[in-house]
Image (cartoon, coloured by chain):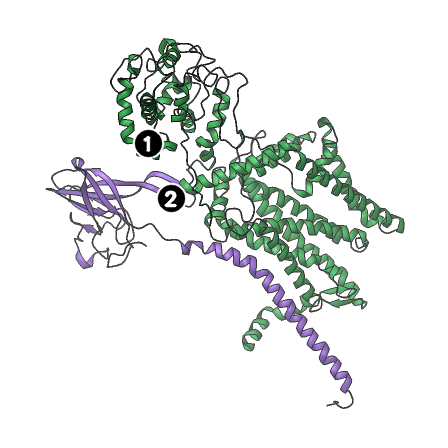
Amino acid sequence: MKTLWNWLDSRTGLGDWCGWLADTPTPGGPGWSKVWPCAITFSFCIEAITGFFLWVYYSPSTQTAWESVYYLQHQVAGGWLLRAIHHYTAHVLLAMLILFVVQTILTGACRAPRELVFWATIGLALFALAAVLTGDLLSWDQNGYSATKTRTGFLTLLPWIGDSLLSLANGGPGSTLGNLTLTRFFALHVGLFSGGFLLLLIIRGALARRVNDAIAATGGATPYWPRQAWRAGFAYLAVLAVVLLLSCQHGVKPPHAGVPTLSPADPANCYSAARPEWFLTGVFQFSQLFPSVWEVVPIFVVTGLLFCIVMVMPFLARTPLGHAFNIVFTLTILAALVGMTYASYAKDRKDAVHQKAIALEQWQADRVLALAEHQGIPPTGALTLLRNDPKTQGPRLFAQQCAGCHSHASNAYEMPEIKTETPTAPNLTDYASRQWLAGLLDPKQVNSAKYFGSTKFRGGKMAGFVKENLSELDAGEKKNLQKAIAALSAEARLPAQQELDARDAKLIEEGRKLLSSDFGCTDCHRFHGKGTLGIAPLLTGYGSPEWLAGIINNSADKQFYSKLNDRMPAYAPNADPTQNTLSLRQVQMLTDWLRGDWYEKKTTIGK
Amino acid sequence: MLKDACCCRQEETDTEDRRGFLKQVAAITSGAVAFLVPTAAGVATFLNPLRQKAKGSQWLRVAALDSLPTDGTPQRFPVITDRTDAWIQFPAEPVGAVFLRRVGAAVTALQSSCPHAGCTIGYDAQAKCFVCPCHKQPRFDLSGKRVDGAKSYSPRDMDGLNVEVRNRGEVWVEFQTFRGGTPTKIAQA
């Protein structure tokens, strides 16, 4: 072992190197207040290590960025911890840099001969800030996307060069973020900002060493090893403990462990609850004090001035008065930022609209996770899962297209009830279910607002039939009516009634016969080969996906209301899909949603 | 050597040495632990592929019986199935190809990838044999046997696959891939 070491040492001079590092002078002797540079270096090493392994999985494109992060976090064992360590260490690193700069100003350690060391530390903070901001976009989720769009948008506030800077940041003209934004941000994050940080860290170390060696020559310093080294080691453990605590704040079990997964970035669906990170919240709140045409003042002018003042602090600190100014100024700005940050969070916490947007995003994120786990991610990306999901899109389509006339008790997260002020068409909650049909065939309800009350069928043939033939039924007739209702409802093949329909197969068979015999439905309706079309809607397959799609496509079709159609618009009557209001897929999602037909993750109740 | 004279001094330096040693141990262990945790998380994810298993064999419908020539000429058919690539689920994609050959009522299936190094084997209609394009040389007869026997580039005959004719006229194949370069057929696990 010893010979091996001797051989290595003679060839490399490694022993001298280690000795040189171990002898790094600690001015004024060892102390806890001097662990910052080591803790910062350590945090950067963590970022480099975890960053490399994240790189192994990451794929920067709009169709794969969110998806590859999803894969790492939810399909690879330990992936959530890796991402969480990288994410939270970055924030801890930035926080430490800010505190270190403040400490340097307050103790006057920024003054000569340490001006360059001080500036290098500020440079490190800026590189770390840039790395965090570029890293934020890489997961391509709703928050990162919206926040980046706002941030890059601020560049246009700058006169002359603003638009060009925006194009350079986005990788294309205008404010659209896309594939080239991701590849750019990824390269900037890994190459320029992290690489630049490393370079500056080495430069700063060399500058500090030069100053400290001079102090050591006068006997005012002690060697790093081991009296300062063990303190640094403990500081590493403290950093790690904080990072692990943050990583496990939502537990250690997927899918909620680690950095919260948000839904994939959707350019068409802006995330209104997007907020800047904690270190920018104060500036964000401050900028809101200005009218938007003057936004350049808080965002660039004031921050630029602050930066300039901080940069000249080493020279100000040469006089006692200047040092006092530095202290008062720094503490004032710090207090103002903390106060502004608190005010911003307090405002958001009380803002019901903001909280609702966050809750909706959480609902959507859980939904996309459930869908991705269930059916995998299509080649077009995870956003397709949400865009093709009846549970997500059904209520939105209904609210846009149908809610002008129809109401629905809904079941969507963001709209528990879709209520039209004055409904002019039937309420479609649980449409075609036994319960819904029982209401339609109830003489007391058929002319109510829930059914035909506000339509031109109020007091029409169907309502007349119900009033005449279905009131004052005896027990036997009532039973027959129930059979007929069960039979008609079974035509819809509703997922919620699947077991019920299977159980009542015999009853449904009897009901089917009653529909065309005793009840005489086929006098007006067509039902399984009996009756004619053109007078009233077809009852074969009533409420089924095909039937519902048909009536949405064109309710004035011969199969449905024909010439008797009330005001129901035809949403897709043309063979050419570009001529239609709704696409085939949209109609499908609407029918699926109305029928309660979508994937639902099975939850085990209890243990 | 100056033990008696400097007895007290010696003890002091002993304590200092012990403290210094403890500090060194503390510095090394705390530093090591702090670096080890994130590195371990990274290495664990890096090694994830070792924990995954490849898809085994799969019965797939490949062709209609009527589309096979009755004179025993082999015909190539793509094998189409859902494919998972990390996070993406590709629906109905070609994942390989097989040669189907109908002799009378019997249908045989051969993997189209060469048992030597996995190149895609072609059919030479004039010579009525299979030829691997990578070396031109591994030639196989219509049943998949190596024409040159043990002297062939290919370490084994073409890989046969199980075939069934189901539902009156659908040709189903138990599709799987085998390791290249071995004299025996080893299913790719």
Position of the N terminus of chain A, as image quadrant, is: bottom right
Chain letter, colour purple in render: B
Task: Evaluate whether label 1 is on the same chain as label 2.
Answer: no
Q: In front here: A205 or A582?
A: A582
Say which chain tag 2 marks: B
Q: Is residue B140 above or below residue A67?
A: below
Q: How far across and down, in percent of the image, does residue A391 sit?
A: 46, 32
* Marker disc for residue B84: 2
**Type of amino acid at the residue the image marks with label 1:** Asp
Q: Is residue B183 above or below residue B176?
A: below
Q: How far across and down, in percent of the image, does residue A532 sit?
A: 28, 13
**Which picture quadrant has residue A414?**
top right
Mark 1 or 2: the one toward you: 1
Residue denoted by label 1: A501
Q: How far across and down, in percent of the image, does residue A179 sit?
A: 51, 36
Chain letter, colour green in render: A
Are there few (<14), some (14-19), or many (20+) residues within 10 Å of tag 2? some
**Which picture quadrant has residue B13?**
bottom right
Say which chain tag 1 marks: A
**Type of amino acid at the residue the image marks with label 2:** Thr
| Residue at screen point 33% across, 39% down | B93
Q: In front here: A11 or A513?
A: A513
Residue A400 in sight from this viewpoint: yes
Residue A195 in sight from this viewpoint: no
In the structure shown, which secondary structural element does the residue marked by tag 2 occupy?
Answer: strand
